[in-house]
Image (tube, rainbow, N blue to C red):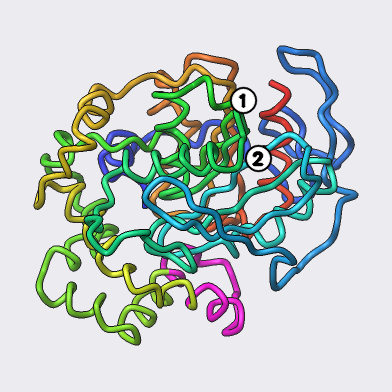
C-alpha cells in the first residue's frame, strides 16, 4: 500500500481541490455531467466513458500467459490488438479483478488494455525455482518492463493504485520513454527507505498495523497459512474501503489469486524490505540507488485521491506535487476508498483517457 512517510508528511493539509462525481469527469477536479471533455496541453478532445460498456462484470473474457523476464506472467487483455496500450496495475491485497469493469470501458474507447497479475499473484509464476522470491520496488517495475517487451509494447499509458501506483511511478521516473501518460492513485509512492526509518504520527503508525504484523513471526505464519491470509486480506478490504459494500463472490474471485505458491514470500519480502528489516537483491541495487534520490516524474500525469482511503492524506495533493514536473492534474474522488478502480471504474477509466490527452 501507500508509502507511510508520504502520508505522514501530508497529514494536516486542508481539503483543497473539490471532489469529483462518479458519473463523469472534466479535466478539472470539479463535478461534471459526463459530457465529453476537451482541452489540455494538446488541445485534443477528451472522450467520455459515460456511454461505455456498463458493469458490473465478474470475469475477463480473455486470460493469457507470456514469458517475460524471470516470470511466466498471467494477464487479462481487452480491446483491439493494435489499439494504443494501457497497462492497469493492481495493488495489495488485490488482483486483476480490480479492473474488471475498467477494462471494458477503456476497450470501448479503442484501447488495448493489459492487466497483469504481479509477481506472487494469480497465475504468474517464476520460471525457475532458483530465482529468489524477492519483491523490491524496482523488481516489480522491471517485471512490467519485461512484460511490455514480451508483448512488443514500446510505450503505454500506465495506471495503478497501491503497489500498482508505485510501480507505474517508478517506470515513469526511470524509463519515461516507455510511458505515454500516468494515472497514479495516491500520488507519488516511490518508497524512500531512509525516511521509512523515522517515526510517523501515531495515527499513521496505527493505519500500518499489518506492516508491523508482517515483521513478526506470528504475521509470517499467518501469511504462510492460506486460510489465515485470505481472512486477513478480507479484513483489510473492510478497513481501507469503508464505504464499499462488496459481496462474498467479489472477494472470493480476487482471493483465488492469493493461493499462488509464492504469495506469502513475495508479500512478506516487500513489506519487510520497505522498513529495512532485510536487504535487497544486489541485482536491483543500482535501480534502488536511483530511487532513493526520489526522482522526478516528467510524463503527463493525473493523480487520484480517494477520499475514504485511510492512506490518502486530506488535501489537494500538495504534499507530493513537486515530484511531478510535466503536464499534471489532481482529482479527489468523494465517497471512495482504497480500491478506487473497482469501486469507481468510470472515474478511473476517465482519468486514463484524460491523462492520455494531457
In three-dimensional space, the C-alpha distance between marks 1 and 2, rounded to whole angstroms, equals: 9 Å
| Vertical placement of residue 194 versus 341, above or below | above
Q: SS class of the residue under badge 1?
A: strand
x%, y% of residue 27? 72, 28
Q: Residues within 10 Å of mark 1 (few under 14, many from 20)?
A: many
**Residue at x 31%, y 60% (from the top left corner):** 128
Look at the image and tell me in which quarter the C terminus lies: top right
In the visual, does 299 lie left or right of 354? left
Q: Where on the picture, by quarter, is residue 92?
A: bottom left
What's the magenta region? 237-255
Q: Which mark is residue 86?
A: 2
User: For the point 71% across and 60% down, which residue is it?
Assistant: 101
The residue singled out by tag 1 in the image is 180
Residue 252 lies in the magenta-colored region: yes
> Closer to the camera, 251 or 280?
280
Q: Residue 18 appears in which quarter of the rendering?
A: top right
Q: Cβ–Cβ below 8 Å for labels 1 and 2?
A: no
Instruction: Give how far across and how far down residue 21 sits, in percent.
Output: 72, 46
Q: Is residue 348 one of those drawn in magenta?
A: no
**Secondary structure of residue under mark 2:** strand
Q: Residues within 10 Å of mark 2 (few under 14, many from 20)?
A: many
Query: Against 47, is 210 above or below?
Result: below
Residue name at image x 83 percent, y 23 percent: 38
Q: Which mark is residue 46?
A: none
Query: Residue 43: horizontal and vertical position, in percent?
Result: 80, 14
Which of the 4 quarters of the picture holds residue 130?
Answer: bottom left
Of residues 213 and 138, the one nearer the viewer is: 138
247 and 125: which is toward the camera: 125
Q: Position of residue 125 (x, y in %)?
A: 41, 63
Majority secondary structure of magenta residues: helix
User: As drawn, is 200 to the left or to the right of 186?
Assistant: left
Amino acid at each position: 500500500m501507500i508509502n507511510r512517510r508520504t502520508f505522514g508528511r501530508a497529514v494536516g493539509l486542508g481539503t483543497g481541490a473539490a471532489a469529483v462525481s462518479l458519473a463523469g469527469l472534466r479535466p478539472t477536479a470539479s463535478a461534471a455531467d459526463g459530457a465529453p471533455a476537451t482541452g489540455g496541453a494538446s488541445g485534443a478532445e477528451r472522450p467520455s466513458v459515460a456511454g461505455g460498456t456498463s458493469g458490473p462484470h465478474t470475469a475477463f473474457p480473455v486470460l493469457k500467459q507470456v514469458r517475460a523476464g524471470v516470470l511466466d506472467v498471467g494477464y487479462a487483455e481487452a480491446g483491439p490488438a493494435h489499439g494504443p496500450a494501457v497497462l492497469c496495475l493492481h495493488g495489495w491485497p488485490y488482483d486483476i479483478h480490480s479492473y474488471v469493469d475498467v477494462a471494458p470501458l477503456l476497450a470501448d474507447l479503442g484501447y488495448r488494455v493489459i492487466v497483469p497479475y504481479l509477481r506472487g499473484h494469480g497465475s504468474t509464476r517464476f520460471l525457475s525455482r532458483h530465482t529468489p522470491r524477492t519483491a523490491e520496488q524496482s523488481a516489480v517495475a522491471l517485471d512490467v518492463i519485461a512484460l511490455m517487451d514480451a508483448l512488443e509494447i514500446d510505450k503505454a499509458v500506465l495506471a495503478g493504485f497501491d503497489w500498482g501506483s508505485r510501480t507505474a511511478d517508478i517506470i515513469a521516473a526511470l524509463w519515461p520513454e516507455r510511458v505515454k501518460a500516468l494515472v497514479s492513485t495516491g500520488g507519488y509512492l516511490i518508497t524512500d527507505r531512509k525516511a521509512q526509518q523515522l517515526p510517523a504520527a501515531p495515527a499513521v503508525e496505527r493505519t500500518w498495523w499489518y506492516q508491523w504484523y508482517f515483521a513478526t513471526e506470528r504475521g509470517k505464519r499467518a501469511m504462510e497459512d492460506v486460510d489465515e491470509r485470505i481472512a486477513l486480506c478480507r479484513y483489510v478490504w473492510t478497513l481501507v474501503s469503508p464505504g464499499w459494500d462488496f459481496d462474498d463472490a467479489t472477494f472470493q474471485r480476487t482471493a483465488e489469486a492469493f493461493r499462488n505458491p509464492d504469495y506469502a514470500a513475495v508479500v512478506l519480502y516487500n513489506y519487510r524490505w520497505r522498513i529495512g528489516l532485510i536487504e535487497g537483491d544486489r541485482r536491483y541495487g543500482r535501480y534502488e540507488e536511483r530511487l532513493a534520490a526520489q526522482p522526478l516524474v516528467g510524463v503527463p500525469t493525473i493523480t487520484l485521491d480517494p477520499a475514504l482511503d485511510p492512506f490518502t492524506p486530506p488535501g489537494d495533493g500538495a504534499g507530493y506535487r513537486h515530484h511531478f514536473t510535466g503536464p499534471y492534474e489532481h482529482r479527489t474522488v468523494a465517497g471512495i476508498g482504497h480500491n478506487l478502480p473497482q469501486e469507481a471504474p468510470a472515474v478511473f477509466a476517465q482519468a486514463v483517457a484524460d491523462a492520455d490527452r494531457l
